[in-house]
Amino acid sequence: MKDIRAKILSNKLVGHVYYKMVLDAPYIARKAKPGQFVQIKCSDGLEPFLRRPFSIHRVNGNIEILYEVVGKGTDILARKKEGEFLEILGPLGNGFAMPRKTNSEPRAIIIAGGIGAAPLVYLAEELARERIKTVVLIGAKTKDAILCEKDFKKIVCEVYVSTDDGTYGCHGFVSRLFHNILKTTESRFETIVYVCGPHGMLKCIAEICAERNFECQVSLEEKMACGMGACLGCAVPTKSGNKLACKDGPVFNACDLSW
Amino acid sequence: MMKIKIGKIKLKNPVMVASGTFGYAKEFEKLVNLKNIGAIITKTITLNPRQGNPMPRICETASGMLNAIGLQNEGIDDFIKEKMPYLSRISTPIIVSISGNNIDEFFILARRLNKIKAISGIELNISCPNIKCKGLVAQDKKETYEVVKAVRKTTNKTVITKLSPNVTDITEIAKAAEDAGSDAVSLVNTFLGMAIDAETGKSKLGNTTGGLSGPCIKPIALRMVYEVSRNIDIPVIGMGGIMNTIDAIEFILAGATAIQVGTANFIEPGISGKIVKGIEAYLKKHKIERIQDIVGKTA
């Protein structure tokens, strides 16, 4: 973990209210695992006061973040130009765990809800590197909010999309798509599910996984101050007491959480 | 040039890190050279483990933040077993922050810590605004006197009493702590505050209210340090929104013998080390031989 002043190599609108920023942070790129995050100071002044957490979208010598403009911090970030500098602290958090080696062949199912796609592209790359059969399901409210479809398709051959309003892909929640996929695919695999998205969606996917005895790793998003386990601001209730999203997470085993 | 003394503790410089903003030091080991800080004050511990308050626990405000953590900690047994071995290996003085529901709990905590050699001092957190009880100890001079007195009796370690700004007259509470034998007072803890989501009508904190910290409280904290330091004879440790060297110097000029860096640790985890270097440079630049020479020297 290091606090680095990193140069912005690019910062581009990639659709609707979504931006992709590339940062020159070789140390973080070298150390990062899928599912980990960075804390970015969006301005040199006092507004906004706290850093903002962003999951690491991809690494390739540099690090990429994919973000949605939702408030003060991300609004400032979206206006940043190539060549400017940002203070970034990372890599932080635990990250996703790769499937365990067992006798049966593993299969990973990645489920992305909206901006929840951000940490999952890096995960898909890592799973591909490990030669683990992977299926990707992308869900969003509407067509404009479908993210990373092309990126996933470059890494994984099976990619399915759904939108809540039916403007693109299957009509309905991604949890229904998940149900349908499970019905039509073979079950000889040891399935492990990786999911990131809105809370309601995570809960729904976690329930389906529990019914079928699938391991399910969820990546949570919480407001944070420090991002490194000092302020105790991002408590997550679990079956063994409060854990911290920043340090014990952001990835949790769904069955450990008190939904 | 930077050496100071608080009670029996000899500090190599006046920069401490505030309780609740630095965990149990290990969290920061990769980002700060722990050896270079004046003293480390650990996250408040209580007799029994505490789950803390419901989420949300933090909320950003203009130039600051509200927190309502609720003293989440694993209790003193866990602290001694799990945290002390690491803290014992750090050469920097370790000051342990404690909080009790009553005088007995403060007494038991202080007595148990008194036996641990690696601990240099105890900071009495009688001013956390986020726990459910009638009022804070630090809001009553008699209760403050009694808690400090009880702790004083049971420990020969340096005792620092951390004061609340949520009072009419902070000086009289500081005097009560001094009269009861406190070696120093640290001020200020957070200001009780609140934030509301206008769309939902709900408080932005799970505990409804929280403690405000950050640069937004600095002018008030500075005034309190100024007032208290002129009315007591024990050292004042100043804090409240210190983000950089200049802020720290202001507190020293106001009357603080030492300072604590708090919320700034969340935003720039390496800041305490930078402030140590910054104060040193300031003293050189102004040809000041000893830091003590400028304590309380505001005109």
Image: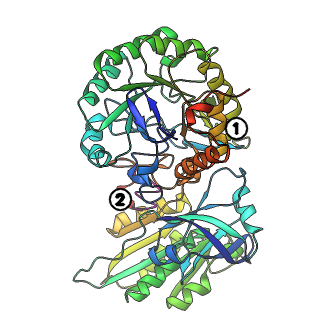
Alpha-carbon neighbours of circle 1 within 10 Å: few (<14), some, or many (≥20)? some
Determine whether, in the image, residue A143 is placed left or right of residue A99.
Answer: right
Q: Secondary structure at mark 1?
A: helix
Q: Is residue B94 left or right of residue B258?
A: left
Q: Amino acid at mark 1?
A: Cys
Along the line of sight, which residue is nearer the eye, B261 or B72? Answer: B261
| Disc 1 chain ID | B
The residue where tag 1 is placed is B216
Which residue is rendered at x = 23% and y = 30% of the image? Answer: B115
Secondary structure at badge 2 equals helix
Chain letter of disc 2 in the image: A
Q: Position of residue B135 (x, y in %)?
A: 52, 17
User: In the rendering, at what x and y percent does residue A253 appear?
Assistant: 37, 62
Q: Write the residue at 29% across / 49% down.
A: B89
The quadrant where residue A79 appears:
bottom right
Residue highlighted by disc 2: A255
Of the residues shown, which amino acid type is indicated by label 2?
A: Cys
Which range is magenta?
A245-253
In the depicted structure, whether residue A9 falls above or below residue B7: below
Of marks 2 and 1, the one in the foreground: 1
Left or right: A135 as drawn, with respect to B200 = left
Position of B145 relative to B202 (above/below): above
Q: Can residue B243 be found in the magenta stretch?
A: no
In the image, what residue occupies the spot 73% across and 53% down? A45
Percent across and percent down for residue B121 are 37, 31
